[in-house]
Image: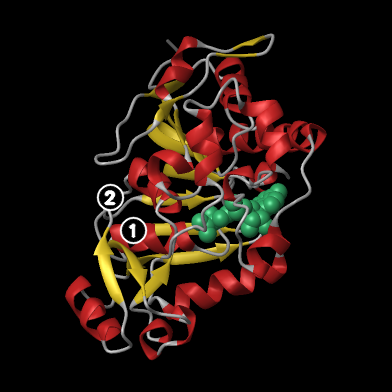
């Protein structure tokens, strides 16, 4: 991935493109989420101040910008599960899905577990979350965070998301109230010119061919996630990339394949967003894709993201 690539491909679709370019020259700020399953915002603020750290509230509940803490993953409070490092944009998809206490939730691509553990906290450890992850190494990181953060309403599975079982052991159909598909993607939204070494290592070398290949997997996954929803249930499809091939194209494909899929509008209080695209080069998408949301680093000073909220209508419309 390079700045030249962004300029060549995305100048026409990203609003205020020069501000966007300027924003990705700055390092990503440090954000954390207080784990309300174990503690309170005040206790975390007080505990971290003893290390010389200060916390400033972000527009999302229990989420903070912090500074003055060089090794946030090495404090006693971190190991006790009082907080989790999570970029602001990464905390948005669960807020849009809004799981309720007692819900049955499927998190199809769950590791390392930032959104699973956030949803468990939103549900106050009630109901059930099935946290699925294909990659065995990442599965153990997911389990580590579930345990560290005191999550008790979650079971872990390891299927290909696109082939997640549709039946229970007794052959009855398996349905969920809510599905989160935080899909594997090309990760363009995490690109900054100033990155930590471990972040840089995760960046895939980018090409449009890669996005087109990911798009094919994502189309299979979104269909499976939707088919696992009960009538009236809701799904969030999210990625941390800008590529329309991996965003609008995938949601548009779902709309073409499933007549009972409806893209719902939503707002996130305090967060500036841009509308999803209805056209890209020669492609035309459903007008309903205006209801989906693009998150850009120059609007939120966090990762770039794409979020779609989809409902399974009671009857085909
Ligand atoms: C964007 S990350 C998920 C981040 C996670 N939701 C969080 O908030 O911490 C996508 C995950 O999907 C996993 N993955 C890739 N292909 C998959 C597949 N076919 N089925 C299930 N998981 C897959 C990757 O290993 C990766 O952990």
Q: Position of residue 195 (x, y in %)?
A: 61, 61
Q: Position of residue 294 (x, y in %)?
A: 47, 32
Please state the quadrant of the image where ligand 1 appears: bottom right
Q: Is residue 105 above or below residue 112?
A: above
Q: Secondary structure at mark 2?
A: loop
Residue 265 shown left or right of residue 130 in the figure: left
Q: Secondary structure at mark 1?
A: loop
**Quarter of the rendering occupied by the N terminus:** top right
Q: Is residue 158 above or below residue 304?
A: below
From where the camera sits, is residue 134 visible? no
Q: How many marks?
A: 2
Residue 313 shown left or right of residue 58 in the figure: right
State the residue at coordinates (59%, 73%). 141
Q: Are marks 2 and 1 in contact (CB under 8 Å)?
A: yes
- In this view, the residue in front, 94 or 10, is 10
Q: Position of residue 164 (x, y in %)?
A: 64, 47
State the residue at coordinates (34%, 24%). 265
Using a 10 Å C-alpha cutoff, classify the residue at mark 2 as few (fewer than 14 neighbours), some (14 to 19) or many (20 or more): some
- In this view, the residue in front, 65 or 141, is 65
From where the camera sits, is residue 11 visible? yes
Q: Is residue 139 above or below residue 23?
A: below
Q: Position of residue 120 (x, y in %)?
A: 36, 62
- Residue where numbered disc 2 is placed: 100
- Residue where numbered disc 1 is placed: 127
Upstream in sequence: badge 2 or badge 1: 2
**Quarter of the rendering occupied by the C terminus:** top left
The extreme left residue here reads: 42
- In this view, the residue in front, 85 or 118, is 85
State the residue at coordinates (25%, 41%). 270
> Within 8 Å: ligand 1 and the Cβ of disc 2?
no
> Within 8 Å: ligand 1 and the Cβ of disc 1?
no
Q: Is residue 149 above or below residue 266?
A: below
């Amino acid at each position: 991935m390079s700045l030249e690539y962004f300029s060549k491909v995305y100048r026409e679709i990203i609003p205020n493109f020069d501000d966007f370019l300027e924003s990705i020259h700055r390092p990503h700020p440090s954000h954390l989420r207080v784990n309300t399953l174990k503690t309170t915002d005040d206790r975390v603020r007080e505990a971290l101040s003893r290390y010389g750290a200060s916390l400033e509230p972000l527009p999302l509940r229990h989420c903070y910008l912090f500074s003055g803490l060089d090794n946030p993953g090495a404090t006693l409070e971190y190991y006790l599960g009082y907080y989790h490092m999570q970029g602001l944009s990464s905390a948005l998809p669960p807020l849009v899905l809004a799981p309720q206490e007692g819900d049955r939730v499927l998190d199809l691509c769950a590791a390392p577990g930032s959104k699973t553990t956030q949803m468990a906290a939103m549900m106050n450890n009630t109901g059930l979350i099935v946290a699925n992850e294909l990659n065995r190494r990442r599965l153990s990181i997911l389990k580590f965070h579930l345990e560290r953060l005191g999550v008790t309403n979650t079971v872990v599975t390891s299927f290909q998301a696109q082939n997640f079982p549709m039946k229970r052991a007794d052959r009855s159909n398996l349905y969920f109230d809510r599905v989160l598909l935080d899909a594997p993607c090309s990760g363009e939204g995490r690109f900054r010119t100033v990155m930590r070494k471990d972040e840089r290592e995760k960046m895939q070398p980018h090409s449009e061919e890669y996005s087109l290949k990911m798009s094919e997997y994502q189309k299979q996954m979104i269909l499976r996630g939707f088919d696992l929803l009960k009538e009236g249930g809701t799904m969030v499809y999210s990625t941390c990339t800008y590529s329309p091939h991996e965003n609008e194209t995938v949601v548009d494909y779902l709309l073409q394949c499933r007549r009972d899929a409806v893209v719902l509008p939503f707002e996130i209080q305090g967060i500036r967003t841009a509308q999803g695209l209805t056209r890209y080069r020669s492609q035309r998408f459903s007008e309903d894709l205006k209801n989906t949301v693009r998150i850009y680093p120059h609007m939120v000073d966090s990762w770039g993201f794409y979020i779609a909220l989809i409902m399974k209508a009671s009857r085909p419309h």
